[in-house]
Image (cartoon, rainbow, N blue to C red):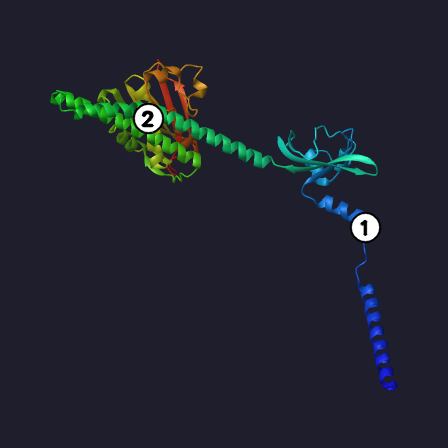
Amino acid sequence: MELAGNGRSRRAGRQMGEHARTIRQRFRTAPRQPEASDQTGLGLAILEASADGVVAIDEHGTIRFSNQAAAKLLGPPAGDLVGSPFGHELTPGQATEIELGGPGGPSVLDVRATSTTVAGERLRIAVLRDVTQRKQSERDLEAALDRQSAALAVAAHELHSPLAAIGVLAHVLSDLQVTMNTAERANLAGRITDLAGRLQMLLRRLLTSMQIEADTAKATPEPVRVLEVIIDQLALVSAEPKAMQVRCGPGVSAAVDRAELTMMLANYIDNALSYAQPPIEITGAERDEWTEIGVRDNGPGVTKAFEPLLFERFARAPEAERQAAGIGLGLWIVRTLARSAGGDAWYEPAKGGGSRFLLRLPRVAGDC
């Protein structure tokens, strides 16, 4: 029994020795706890690597610390930034935005502030983040929504009158108790046709405007005979033959999307028929590397005050609003499509009175 007891004691002693050796080994291989100086260096390294700017500001508004990101956002080097006034009001616990001006243009910073005490001194810690691009995107979205709202308001106003007129005329035609001869009925039917055509033009302009705004129109330039497009458009207008004059050679061509040229020329012709007096002259000619198309009328012309606004979106002169229906998109569409095709559109007073609306497009390569 004593031998057995001694054996158990020796085994227990060996096990305790092994446990002790294991503990010592773990102690030797365990990571060393960082000292205070190491932690300070690690914190500074993290701050310097941060993509957000960080500044510490004392109770007098003076910057006591700045990382490199803050220096880039605020302007001067970090060394020059320390000791300078921050210059903006901060409320701990609240987010604010500050606008800055600089050589690269204005910028907007989102600022989040908190407060702390270091070595008995009260400091405000501000984290700065550049949100210029986000704010610009928000402004662009707001502007797009405003334009859409304006387009809907204008469309609702301008589409209401012809729709109401079509409804009244159609009701008269369908009323069997109204006595009319064939000529009178044909006249009413013709008025309905004209109003329907006007509605189609307004809707085409609205759709084109939305496509331009959404940048979904993918135009493919091609050689287009200008005279062919002119003839196609004249076949669609309700004007006396003598009221329209054309001076364009059959070989005059432009490098442009045919549908877009059709829309541009249709808007110019419709503008002349709506607001001016005949005769209306349409010209096409090639000059150097350009093809120029012009539509001249004999109307009162455009006032000097309104000339700068002539090609603006939804712009309509007061006298034009009284003279004809419209939504102020036609000339804007012409200029926008012309410039996207590498050309331009503009207005000139015509010699002897009237107006000249001109369109310049790239000439077909090889014809120059």
* Image vertical order of residue 192 relative to residue 216, above or below: above
Which residue occupies the foreground of this view, 145 or 281?
145
Q: Residue 159 carries which label?
A: 2
- Identified by mark 1, the residue type is Asp
Residue 321 is situated, as x and y percent measured from the top left of the image, at 36, 18
- Identified by mark 2, the residue type is Leu
Residue occupying image coordinates x 45% and y 20%: 308
Residue occupying image coordinates x 29% and y 16%: 277
Query: Which residue in the protein does label 1 denote?
Result: 38
Apparent side of residue 234 relative to residue 115 in the rendered image (left or right):
left
Secondary structure category for the residue under label 1: helix
- The quadrant holding residue 98 is top right
Mark closer to the chain start, 1 or 2: 1
Structural distance between the alpha carbons of marks 1 and 2: 75 Å
Secondary structure category for the residue under label 2: helix
Residue occupying image coordinates x 34% and y 27%: 267
Residue 117 is situated, as x and y percent measured from the top left of the image, at 79, 37
Which quarter of the rendering shows the N terminus?
bottom right
Which residue occupies the foreground of this view, 16 or 268?
16
* Image vertical order of residue 346 relative to residue 51, above or below: above
> How would you rate the neighbour count of disc 2 (Cα within 10 Å): few for under 14, some for 14-19, many for 20 or more?
some
Residue occupying image coordinates x 57% and y 34%: 135
